[in-house]
Amino acid sequence: MKEKSTSSKRLRPVRGAIVLCLLAASSPSFAAEAGPKSWDGPLSGPVAQPSKRVVYVGGDFRNGGIAGVCRALQTAGEELGWSVTKVDGRGEIAVLRREFADAVATHPDAIVFGGFQPNDVPEHVAEAKRKNIVIVGWHAAEAPGPTKDLFVNISTDPLAVADQAAAYAMTVGHPTPGFVIFTDGRYAIATAKAERMKQNIEKCERCRVLSVEDQPIEHAAKIVPPAVVRLHDRFGSSWTHTLAINDLYLDHMNFPLKNVGRGDVVNISAGDGSHKALSRIRSGLSPQLATIAEPLNTQGWQLADELNRAFAGGRPSGFVTKPLLITSESLQRIDDDDVESDIAYREAYRAIWSGSRPNDRDPSSASADGGASAP
């Protein structure tokens, strides 16, 4: 269906024997948990190209990242005078192919891949190219930047996300952690994150990787509960930590862990910062202690800006957003779970689209004005 836009106890950090392990894992600094304090993205670009029609094809809107970045794109599109519609692939490849084919048939100005890859629909990508439809992606390739099929793919650096998740996980919970990693090997970005987390853990002498669980993310609700029982039966108390490439796996882990008496397992997600994840992290009562969030609102507006550059015949901006380490402590410092409240993306992109000269306005000093809150 198309929709048009109209407008258990917490564990204390381990204090001993972590320095060598963190150095081996090349961990980032955790000082800026809530993210950058100023705008480090583009300050110049083409003025708004109005009256464009964009279709956002989401792989599965149960994924908070896919849904959140779409909302932000729709908000930005309204400011540009665009029509932005969304369609949901519902995590089923047959549905996804049908919806994408339908989108191409309507000949929009642009199509956005939301959380799936061009090689899932190669014949339809070829047809879109023949029709000169601009194609961009969010989490649609292994890394950010242009690809052979995409004008640009937008994401944080997945390896930086993985580094941050693994490094933080090794500072909390049991001093000799045993890790289970949940991933979905069908997606290049998920594979890159999972492999990088595994590599970081294997560099830590006191840590072990017990299992890498390659499970389809759209079936997490059905797969995770029995997987918890199986993993507990197999590893027992050796399983102390879970790393997942997306919050969606952890959405379905709390009660199964409680049912097997494992309130001590620490859960960390390497993406994307969904509403559900932020709520349970803020509470301090969940096994999930952190998520490495994508700045979804910033990325939604960046999608709009990259499309605007393509419509104007320009080149991609080259901007890559930074991931945000979100913990209970960092959430206590903000009021409404807007983890991007100190990123001046709205002011910066408005200045570009209106034709303001970069020196006329300092986006990092402008006040926020009520754009979409973080999912």
Image (cartoon, rainbow, N blue to C red):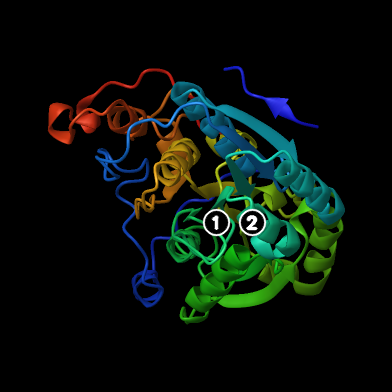
Residue at x-position 74% and y-position 50%: 253
Q: Indicate whether 177 appears above or below 60.
A: below
How far separated are the C-alphas under marks 1 and 2? 37 Å
Residue 130's label in the rendered image is: 2
Residue 328's label in the rendered image is: none
Which of 338 and 114 lies nearest the eye of the viewer? 114
Which quarter of the figure has residue 232? Answer: bottom right
Amino acid identity at mark 2 = Arg
Residue at x-position 67% and y-position 76%: 210
Q: Quadrant of the N terminus?
A: top right
Relative image position of residue 80 (x, y in whole percent): 45, 26
Q: Indicate whether 47 appears above or below 311.
A: above
Query: In the displayed structure, does residue 171 sit left or right of residue 178?
Result: left
Query: In the displayed structure, does residue 160 sit left or right of residue 40?
Result: right
Residue at x-position 80% and y-position 73%: 234
Residue 373 in view (yes/no)? no
Q: Secondary structure at mark 2?
A: helix
Q: Is the residue under label 2 in contact with that under label 1 (CB below 8 Å)?
A: no
Mark 1 / mark 2, whichever is N-terminal: 2
Q: Secondary structure at mark 1?
A: loop
Query: In the displayed structure, does residue 58 sit left or right of residue 222?
Result: left
Which residue of the protein is positioned furthest toward the left in this rendering? Answer: 359
Residue at x-position 79% and y-position 50%: 96
Could you classify mark 2 by the number of other residues whose Cα lies within 10 Å: few (under 14), some (14-19), or many (20 or more)?
A: few
Which of 370 and 328 lies nearest the eye of the viewer? 370
The residue singled out by tag 1 in the image is 270
Amino acid identity at mark 1 = Ala
